Amino acid sequence: MTIRYECEGCGAVLKIKDELAGTDGKCPKCKAEFIIPEPEGSAEPPQAKQAAPSGKKPVPAKGNVKKGAAQSDDFDVAAFLMEGDGPKPTPGIPAPPTQESQPRSGPKPITPPGARIAAPPPDTAAAAASAAMGASANARDLLTKTAEESRTRASSMPDEESRPRIDYSMALAQLRQYTPHIAGSVVGILLLAFMSSYMFGNRVPLPKLWDVSGNVTLDGEPKANLRVTLSPVETEGEATNGKKISLRSSVAITDEDGFYRVEYMPGVRGAPLGKVKVTIEPVDGDMTVYQSLPPEYLPNSAATVIREVREAGNSDQFTFNLVGH
């Protein structure tokens, strides 16, 4: 017959031989001392109490723990039969640590200087080994569970063929719809650029030009804002590239000093060689100035003034000293 006792220090369940009832006991887990209680249903202590180790006085108190008492060297650890209430371990697999085998947390005792540190009792080393084995088993179980979950997720993922693909048909349809418009816009821009370059760039065929400048005075005073136009008598000419072209008129406007320099086209100075008809008229349409000018210099006049553009000396022959009437 055994005595079932639950340690009040750590809660471990102990089974003790009934002949040790009434003697001092010590928990093999937390080392807490207590009085071994009487067996249940026994009115008197068994005869084995007299055979208790010498120097031990039986105490009738039941289940009282003697905390802080000195450890007894006569205590027999083998007298306690430790039995857990949890599931039995499977052969070949270390059992996980139970509540009784886990070390209790708490402040560590302070060892005084010079004191010798005693080696841990065998049961503490066994508990530590059991805890390490349990931790290893838990890690192995966790790895196994993780591998199984990975395989499950991999098997549940759709195959590459069943994954949705991008449909490019809509994009291709939009591209076919707007391609003619885009191509037409590009062609129009290029054509406009070519025409602009042809009309205003260096590709416009020009004849060989010579610098023509002079002064205009009216009644001995320099006259400003007068338009001087030199129109070629021969309208057909030859460009610098050898092509036949129609010659333009060269135009200039006098400044405050009555000075002018003709331009064949904006930004291009000079006039082609040959005879030209000279016309002079006010820019702002002032009729007083218009009527004071000699009629032969006015546009649409029957009498005309003809001068010749030469390679040199054009300033002298294109200086006009007009006399008003």
Image (cartoon, rainbow, N blue to C red):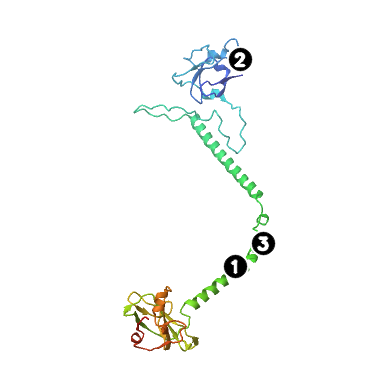
Can you give x and y, in whole percent of width and height, for residue 77 in the image? 52, 24
Q: Nearer the viewer, mark 3 or mark 2?
A: 3
Crowd class of label 2 (few under 14; some 14 to 19; many from 20; radius 10 Å): few
Secondary structure under the numbered disc 3 in the rendered image: helix
Can you give x and y, in whole percent of width and height, for residue 324 in the image? 36, 80
Name the amino acid type tagged 3.
Answer: Ser
The residue at 66%/63% (across/down) is: 173
Q: Is residue 291 left or right of residue 193?
A: left
* Residue that label 3 marks: 169
Nearest the camera: 315 or 278? 278
* Residue that label 1 marks: 182
Q: Nearer the viewer, mark 2 or mark 1?
A: 1
Nearest the camera: 105 or 284? 284
Q: CA distance from mark 2 to mark 1?
A: 104 Å
Name the amino acid type tagged 2.
Answer: Glu
Mark 3 or mark 1, which is nearer the start of the sequence? Answer: 3
Secondary structure under the numbered disc 1 in the rendered image: helix
* Residue that label 2 marks: 40
Crowd class of label 1 (few under 14; some 14 to 19; many from 20; radius 10 Å): few
Mark 1 or mark 2, which is nearer the start of the sequence? Answer: 2
Nearest the camera: 254 or 241? 254
Name the amino acid type tagged 1.
Answer: Ile
Q: Is residue 252 above or below residue 53?
A: below
Q: Nearer the viewer, mark 1 or mark 3?
A: 1
Mark 2 or mark 3, which is nearer the start of the sequence? Answer: 2
Q: Is residue 230 left or right of residue 259?
A: right
Residue 257 is marked as: none
